[in-house]
Amino acid sequence: MLVLSRKVGQSLVIQEDIVLKVVSIDGENVKLGIEAPKHISIYRDEIYESIKSENKGAVLNQKEIDLQELATLLMQSKHAAEDQDA
Amino acid sequence: MLAQEKRKVSTPAASTVRFVRDIPGFSGIQHYKILEPAEGTPFYRLMPDSEEFSFLLLHTFDYFGDYDFELPKQEQDLLQLNKESKILVFSIVNWGSGLKAATVNLKAPIVVNPANGSALQIILDTEMYKVKEPLLPAIMKSR
C-alpha cells in the first residue's frame, strides 16, 4: 500500500483524471473530496462490501429453477396467511 | 428525475440488457438477459449470457408502493436518460433457505433504461431502505 502525507486542502491525482482532496480533518473524521469521470463508481467500502456479499448470496446456481414450485409455495403461504386472518 | 414515476413499461419475454457498470461482486460481466416471470410467480430472472447462474428479481414498485429514490445525474447520464425517459426498477431477491426467509434488497436496486437496454445497480445513499427487507409481507400485502 502506498502511503502519502497530505495537509488539508492538498490533493493527489490517480491515473490523470481522478483527484482526491483532503477537505477537512476533525478529530478522527477526515472529509475527502473526489473528482472522477462518471463511469468510475465510488462507494464507502463497508457499504460496497455489504452489497457485494448480498449479491453473491442472492445468486441461484442452477440454470433452471422450478418457478412452479415457487408459485405453489406462494399460494400455500397466501392461504396459510388467510387462515390465520380468519 | 424521480423513480417514483410508476408508469408501466412492458418488457419483451426476454430482453437483453447491458450493464454500463459491473454489478458489485460480478466484475467483467456486462451482458445479461431479463426473463419475464413464469405464470403465477412475481419473479423476473436476470441471467448473464455466458454464465450459468441467475438472480431472482422483483418489479419493486409492484410490491413496495411507497418506494422512491432520486437517480443521481451521474447514473442518469450513464443510462442515457432524458426528461421523457421511462425506467424500470427491479430489486434482487435473496431466496435464502426458502420463502419465509427470503429478502429483497431495497438498498441497491437495478435500474434499466428500456429504450436502449442499458442497466446498472445503484447503491442508494440512504438509511431508509434495507439490504434485507423481508419478502413475504410485501407479497402478501400486494395481493
Image: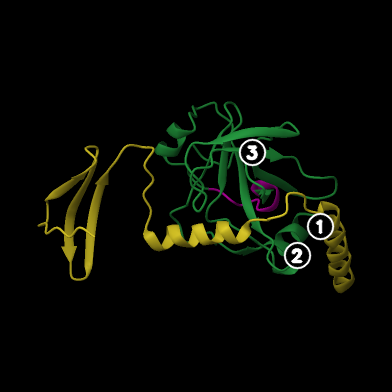
Disc 3 vs disc 1: which is toward the camera?
A: 3
Q: Is residue B56 magenta?
A: no
> Is label 3 in a helix, a strand or a loop?
loop
Q: Position of residue B38 (x, y in %)?
A: 81, 45
Do the residues at discs 2 and 1 belong to one chain?
no
Circle on res. B49? 3
Q: Is residue B63 magenta?
A: yes
- Tell me the distance, in whole angstroms, between the alpha carbons under discs 2 and 1: 8 Å
* Comes first in the chain, label 2 or label 3: 3
* Image quadrant assignment for residue B12: top right
At x 80%, y 55%, the residue is B143
Q: Nearer the viewer, residue B16 or A77?
A: B16
Q: Residues within 10 Å of mark 3 (few under 14, many from 20)?
A: some
> Quick one: which chain is green?
B
Please give left or right for residue B124 compared with residue A13 in the image.
right
- What kind of residue is marked 1? Leu
> Quick one: which chain is yellow?
A
Where does label 1 land, which residue? A70
> Is label 2 in a helix, a strand or a loop?
helix
